[in-house]
Image (cartoon, grey):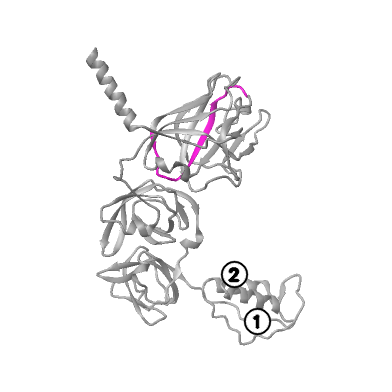
Amino acid sequence: MKKLLSLIAVAVMAFAAQAASLTVANGSAEAEFAPFYGMFMDTQGATTQTIYPAEMLADMQGGLITEIRFYAAAPFNGLGQGNLQLALKEVEQNGFTSTDLVTGATVVANGYPVQDETELVFVLEEPFAYNGGNLLIETVLITAGDGKTTKFIAQAFDYAVGLAAYTYSWSTSYYYETEHNLPKATFTYEPGQGGDETTVASLAEANALEDDAEFTFNGDAVVTVCKNGYVFLRDESGYGQIEVNATLENGQVLSQGWKAKKATIVDPWVRFTDATGLSANGTNAELAKAQELTAFPDESMLNAYVVIKNAVSGSGGFPILPQYYYTLQDGSKLYVTSCLWNHNFDAGNYNVYGVICKDGGKLKIQIVEFETIVEPTVKLGDVNKDGKVTIADVTALIDALLSGNTDVETDNYSPVNADVNERDGVTIADVTALIDLLLSGEGD
C-alpha cells in the first residue's frame, strides 16, 4: 500500500509539473450576456460567443487547453438543470461589429452551473491546441434549464467582445445582445515543448526558415490562386506556395494556426509541404489581385501572381512550352515553364496570368490562365445628330475598358452639349466623365 501511495503521489506531482494555468480579464466590471445569458437559460438553442484577444493569452501559445473556468459575481441561483455545450475556435476578428455569429467552432466540452456555486467549470473531452490567435468561446444551450439573471466578474472593453443570440418562445426570429465586458476566465493548459515548434507571422519569415523546419503560421496570408494541388499565397511581406490538396478561392484569407514544413525545391524557390489545418476566414481582394508585369521580375517576386496584358497568339497556337517566351514592355524576354491550365487557342490578343518561379536557375512564368481580350465595339464618334450616344454604346464602351483594352477610337469625338434623353441617351459630357474615371484606374 505504501508503494502504491508513493506511485500515486509521483503521478500527481508529474501532472502538476506539466499543467499550468492562466487567468485573464479579472476586472471590476460585470458581464450579463457572456459566457451565457442567464435570462434565457430556459430557451433551447440560446447561443453566446465571446472572443478573448490573443495578447491576453500569449503565455498559453503552443499549449493544449484542458479546462476553462468562469466566475459568477454571486452564487448561481434558480437556473435549474440543463446542458451547455462549449466550443472553441481561433479567429481573425477581435470582437463583433454585426449580429453575424462565427461558424465552424469545435465542440470540446459540456457543463452547467451548479446551484449555490460561484464557478462554472468546463473540462475538455480532448485537449484543444492553442496556436496564438484570438480565441472564440461559444456556449450553446442544448438542454434548457430555467431563466434567471446571472452576472460574471469581467473586464470592460470599449468594443463588443461578446454576442448573445436567443429566441422567445412565441417567435422563430433571433434577438441579439452585445457584451462589452469580457468574463474573467482561467485556462488550465499543458505548455508547449519549449522551442520544438516554430511560430511565424509572415510569409517572409516562413521562407527564411531552414529546410525541413516545421512551423505554425499565425499571420494573415491571402490566397492568390489555387490550381492542381498548389496554393499560392501573398501577405504584406511577400509570397509563398503550399503544396497540398485543398479547395480554396482567390482572395480568401487563411485562418491563423495552420501548420506546414518549409522545403526549398529549386533554390531559392520555396514551397510549404505537409500543410494541415487550412481553412478560410474572410477575404482580401486587394492582396489577391494579379500584378501587371511590364518589366522583368526580380527574385523578390518569386511566387508572385502576375498578368501580362495584350499578349499576342501565333497562328500555330499560344506559347506554353519551355522554348517559348513573352516579350515584356521593357523589351526583356520572360520564358515559360509548366502550365497549370489547359486552353484552346484562337488567333488574337490575350491577358496571360501566371506565377513567377525559378526553373533551371532562371526566373520564369508558370502559366495559370489565359483571358481572351474582346475588342471594343464602340467609338466616341458614334453620336446621333442630337449629340447623344445610346445606353447600349455606353455599355459596350465600359466592357471594352474594363477588359483591359483602352484603345478606344476618338477620331470623331467632339464635345457636343446636349440634354440627356430620358429614354435612351446620355450626354457627351457624361460619357467623357465616365471614360476619364475608367482610364484613371478608379472605375472598378
Q: Nearer the viewer, residue 13 or 421?
A: 13
SS category of the residue bearing label 1: loop
What is the spatial separation of the Cα atoms under label 1 and label 2, in whole angstroms?
Answer: 22 Å
Rendering coords of residue 113 (x, y %): 53, 23
Q: Do tag 1 and tag 2 residues touch (Cβ < 8 Å)?
A: no
Depicted 77 relative to depicted 337: above or below? above
| Residue at point 61%, 87% (across, down) | 411
For residue 87, side relative to residue 192 (left or right): right
Magenta segment, prevailing SS (helix, strand or loop):
strand
Q: Is residue 321 visible?
A: no
Observer-nearest residue: 405 or 216? 216
Please identify, in this view, whether the residue under mark 1 or under mark 2 is nearer the observer.
Answer: 2
Asked if residue 342 is positioned above or below residue 282 in the image, the reply reads below
Name the amino acid type tagged 1. Answer: Asp
Q: Residue 393 is drawn in which quadrant? A: bottom right
Q: Secondary structure at mark 2?
A: loop
> What is the quadrant of residue 195 in the picture?
top left
Q: Classify 10 Å Cα crowding around label 1: few (below 14), some (14-19), many (20 and above).
A: some
Sooner in the amino-acid sequence: mark 1 or mark 2: 1
Q: Which residue is mark 2?
A: 443
Asked if one can make out residue 183 in the rendered structure from this viewpoint, the answer is yes
Q: Is residue 290 above or below residue 186?
A: below
Identify which residue, 283 or 419, lies in the foreground: 283
Q: With 117 as the anchor, is 414 left or right in this view?
A: right
Q: Which residues are magenta?
A: 127-147
The question of residue 132 being in magenta is answered with yes
Q: Where is residue 156? Give x, y as percent.
A: 59, 40
x, y (%) of residue 270?
30, 60
10 Å crowding of disc 2: few (<14), some (14-19), many (20+)? few
From the image, which quarter does the C terminus lie in? bottom right
Say which residue label 1 marks: 382
